[in-house]
Image (tube, grey):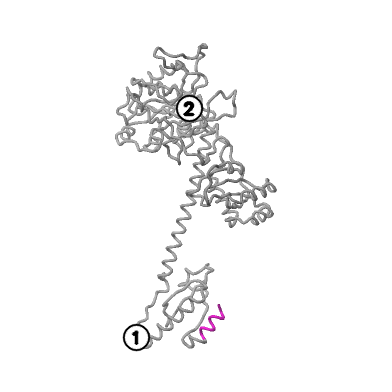
Amino acid sequence: MVGTLKKIKLEIGGDFLTFAIAKSDNIQVLTRFRKQSEPTWMFIVGGQLVNLMFGADAPKLTNLIITEISKEKAVQKGEATREALPFDELTPEEKVRRSEKEKQRLAAKAQEEAIEAAARAAAYHKELRNLMKYIRSYTVILLMPYLYENGTAEAWQKLIEELGPMGYSVQDEESLELLPSLASEFINGGMQEVSEEFNEQLKSGKTIAKLLLYQPPEVPETLPPGPDEKGAEAEPSVLTAESDAIFGAVRVIYGCHPSDGEGELLPADPESFEAKYRKAIDIPAFWTPITPTGKANAIMKLFPKFAEKYKLPPPPPLPPVITIIFDANKSPEVNEMMQSYTDEVIITGYFTGSDPSSVKKVGTSKEEYDQLQYKQDGETLVVVVSRKRSEPLLSFCQLGPIYISDNTDDGKKDYKAFFPEEEEETGEELLSDEPEKTSKLHVTIPQCGGHEGQVSEYMYEKEENFVPEYDEASGLSSTFEKVQSLEAEAETPTQTAAKAEG
């Protein structure tokens, strides 16, 4: 650049042009240029700033010098007027650059917040799945404020008189102001706000949350139910020890019966506790969860001390990592390389693209990816490698990745973006290469009477995919979820309940 400047002065500038270097550290009006490595060119005429340029673009600088010299000659001839810029104010170019920089900062902040939110949601879902293993014998009932008169609730006394002989007992109780957002999350799965009338009723007093334990009394062994007089298969008359506590509570409160196991719903009893005591269809008197996920979420929110007993231990600290992205076509050679560095490879995954904010995971291993029937262009293999040694990183770089994290800080961010939380073995959700089947079973908030009010037992066919109506961020829904078979843990200790795959 020095040679270019000398040439410009000799051939173009002459006495019109003088070059000088200013140290912004010691000049007050140049404070905004401190701690910047980028060259800044200021054009000063007669003690006035007339233009500004950033960068080391020699052709651009040359053209700008020629332009400014021509302008100044015109000013000295009286043919133009000099347009000065204040030293202590931003120039038009600085304003544009600052605006672009602010946009980039906000975009980066939004992306980082989205990644953190996804990580928090994934961690919360993991806690829910873990809690579901231990709370099959528990459920929650909410009693709305308007059930209580003079501190007593006739409805609750009658309800517990019916639930008690079935084996339900109150283990804990909380009094709270039920906010509309939490009411919506519980009752509507967060997909619809509660009505203004319901919100006003909630303000009338405290909502009572009761944590119930279900310990069914011993019942004599009976033969499986046979067909009734109409030829239809009759449902069992009692709950069993293997049943989830939500079933009995749902039957009593909402007056609803389980399905016949084939997706066809049995008639619901319209004379339920909920139908009798509610003020309107959208102003319920009771609420009890109708899905294991909803129950786990309610216990986490309403009885945190109880849930704390089953909290997962903190994960081990993540070592310094680098995230490397390959085209999925390079899967064979990358996987062969991984065999040499099994201790350094933290996690791998196959995705639909390279932008973590929009991709979906399609596999966790080469075997899973190879089994996909449909593959698309742009699919990637993401490998997260420990940075404790340089050899693994150098070896993977030789395979021609399309992206490598600049440093371990970026590597950790990329890792969290692609893998917001290491999924549990039973809870991992992959993008299916098969078209999804829509379930015949669609259940909304229990409205006893008519098909909307009928509540189903779980359906255990593992191969069927449902399309649940629920909020992906919260994982909550008023639609019934397909879960793994809830057999006795003593016989199958590894079985857990999982949320429905969408």
Locate residue 103: give its quadrant. Answer: bottom left
> Which segment is the magenta one?
1-9
Q: Is residue 249 magenta?
A: no
Residue 61's disc number: none
* Circles 1 and 2 in contact, beta carbons < 8 Å: no
Residue 419 sits above or below residue 460 on the image: below
- What's the amino acid at mark 1? Glu
Instruction: Look at the magenta stretch and give its main secondary structure.
Output: helix
The residue at which mark 1 appears reads as: 79
Residue 480 sits above or below residue 392 on the image: above
Q: Does the magenta stretch include residue 2?
A: yes
Residue 150 in view (yes/no): no
Measured as percent of width and height from the top left, residue 452 is found at 36, 28
Nearer to me, 490 or 18:
490
Nearer to me, 69 or 35:
69
Figure quadrant of the N terminus: bottom right
Q: Which label lies toward us, 1 or 2?
A: 2
The residue at which mark 2 appears reads as: 459
